[in-house]
Image: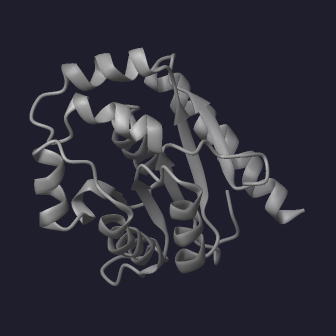
Amino acid sequence: MQPEDTPLRIIVMGVSGSGKSTLAQGLSNSLQLRMKDGDELHLPESVEKMRAGIPLQDADRWPWLDRIADYLTETEETSAQHAGGIVACSALKRAYRDRIRRHAGAVVFLFLDGSPEVIRQRMQARVGHYMQAGLLDSQLQTLEKPTNDETDVITLQIDQSVAAILAQALEGLKASALKALL
């Protein structure tokens, strides 16, 4: 999709319950890129806050966003893969996306957008996840949907099958890579 020496760095973004981890894993399998769920990069105290139903503040997120950018830019020494990868991460505010851009360079964001009702149902059906459905409202209030000037964002609607979303994501990434080469 991109020249061999250009790392493909992807953030699958959206509120909790939108399907970020599922899409990121599908992309990882399809593109043979390493993948990390951004939840794994939170500090333990941030996880405890969310487990207790306490929304995170920006001060909680800055180190997390830096670790996400670091993951995308590090080279995996144990394989032939070049730097790059996929991270499932909410990236709710423009400032969060800008911070990742500043630290990781060229990134493509895949924004999973959908109705609060569908997302709430998904969250309530999850078992064993620390992010409580009650925090969805705070995430929706925090969410700054990407604007047209964020040309590195591809918006995908979640009201369809995972296979359809994955196919659209792959087509969007292909078109994005082609635009970058022109």
Question: Where residue 71 sits: x, y (%)?
Answer: 38, 73
Residue at 44% x, 35% y is: 140
The residue lying furthest to the right in this view is 182
Q: Closer to the camera, 44 or 152?
A: 44
Q: Is residue 14 above or below residue 91?
A: above
> How was this image coloured?
one colour
Q: Is residue 84 above or below residue 22?
A: below
Question: Where residue 53 sits: x, y (%)?
Answer: 16, 42
Residue at 57% x, 45% y is: 144
Q: Is residue 115 above or below residue 49?
A: above
Residue 38 appears left or right of 26: left
For the N terminus, the quadrant is bottom right
Question: Where residue 137 sits: x, y (%)?
Answer: 36, 31
The image quarter containing residue 35 is: bottom left
Question: Where residue 63 sits: x, y (%)?
Answer: 34, 75
The answer, for residue 14, to whether it is visible in the render is: no
Residue 115 appears left or right of 71: right
Q: Closer to the camera, 72 or 128?
A: 128
For the C terminus, the quadrant is bottom right
Q: Closer to the camera, 67 or 28?
A: 67
Residue at 10% x, 55% y is: 48
The answer, for residue 176, to whether it is visible in the render is: yes
Residue at 64% x, 70% y is: 106
Number of numbered discs visible in the structure rendering:
0
